Image (tube, grey):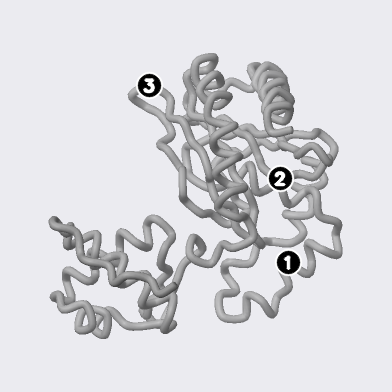
Amino acid sequence: MSQPIKAPPAYVVTSVDNALRIAAMLQLEGSLSVTEIAKRVGVAPSTAHRLLATLVYRDFVTQDEDRTYRVGPVLELAAHSQSGASRLRAAGLPHLRRLVDLFDESANLAVRTGDTVRFVASVESSQALRVGSREGMVFPAHRTTAGLLLLAELDDEQIESLYAAERYAEHPAERPDMVALRRDLSRVRRSGFALNQGRSERGVVAVGVPLHDEGGELVAGLSVSMPSVRYDKEQLPTLVGTLRATATALERDLA
């Protein structure tokens, strides 16, 4: 059966429509300059630049060194199906809210695809000074708490393959220090949790534990994040213990 031709909505939000057109254009056609994008969309270069800056911030688009734009990690993520991520988010949100009620710090769930992690659920603290929601955002795996947890399940050969130098030939600065990364992952494997002090963002501390499915496979990282000025290392055992209990409860719900 042929699909009916879609009529435009009565009230089109032009900026949203243009941003979606840009994202689709880059996904289908590859890298483009801001001048080319502005011409194609029919806006001024300054307007195109603002739209692209927002798409870059939300990881739908990435700017290369030659100042052209291409699709970012959000549009490239394919390993986690929409249904799987939606199920994890739906099951996880009540547990994240309980963590926020307990600690009044922001709580997150994130999954890994390749060398990046995507935050699929996030609940913010109610405090004025807090770590903002990361939901939907993508970060390099080696710079995040959840990423370290998820990378720690891989053996040394898999880590070497994932971070092979040739994969970073065009962006060598994005490749992590492999000696330091192996050391960090070894520490995570021994302790069973990850502590991130300023790796992904200056002034932010996060603590996380792994989340497994009913078959025992590691599927996500569960974490609490806070401004570093409120982090007390004496509280670490309590944070880790509560996170582990929460992960166990969430694993039962997922099963």
* Residue at the spot of label 1: 162
Measure the alpha-carbon separation of dots 3 and 1. Answer: 38 Å
The residue carrying pointer 1 sits among few (fewer than 14), some (14 to 19) or many (20 or more) residues within 10 Å by Cα, namely some
Q: Quadrant of the C terminus?
A: top right
Q: Position of residue 136 (x, y in %)?
A: 46, 49
Q: Is residue 236 visible?
A: no
Q: How many marks?
A: 3
Q: Residue beneath label 3, please?
A: 127
What residue does disc 2 label?
Answer: 219
100 lies above or below 217: above
> SS class of the residue under badge 2?
strand
* Residue 114 appears left or right of 229: right
Residue drawn 56% across the image and 21% down it: 99
Along the polypeptide, which appears first: circle 3 or circle 1? Answer: 3
Q: Are marks 3 and 2 in contact (CB under 8 Å)?
A: no
The quadrant in which residue 177 appears is bottom right
The first of marks 1 and 2 along the sequence is 1
Name the amino acid, label 2: Val
Q: At label 1, which amino acid type do we have?
A: Leu
Q: Regarding mark 3 in the picture, which secondary structure is present there?
A: loop
Residue displayed at 69% across by 33% down: 254
Q: CA distance from mark 1 to mark 2?
A: 18 Å
Depth check, mark 3 against mark 2: the one in front is: 2
The residue drawn where x is 69% and y is 28% is 247
Residues at marks 3 and 2, CA–CA distance in whole angstroms: 30 Å
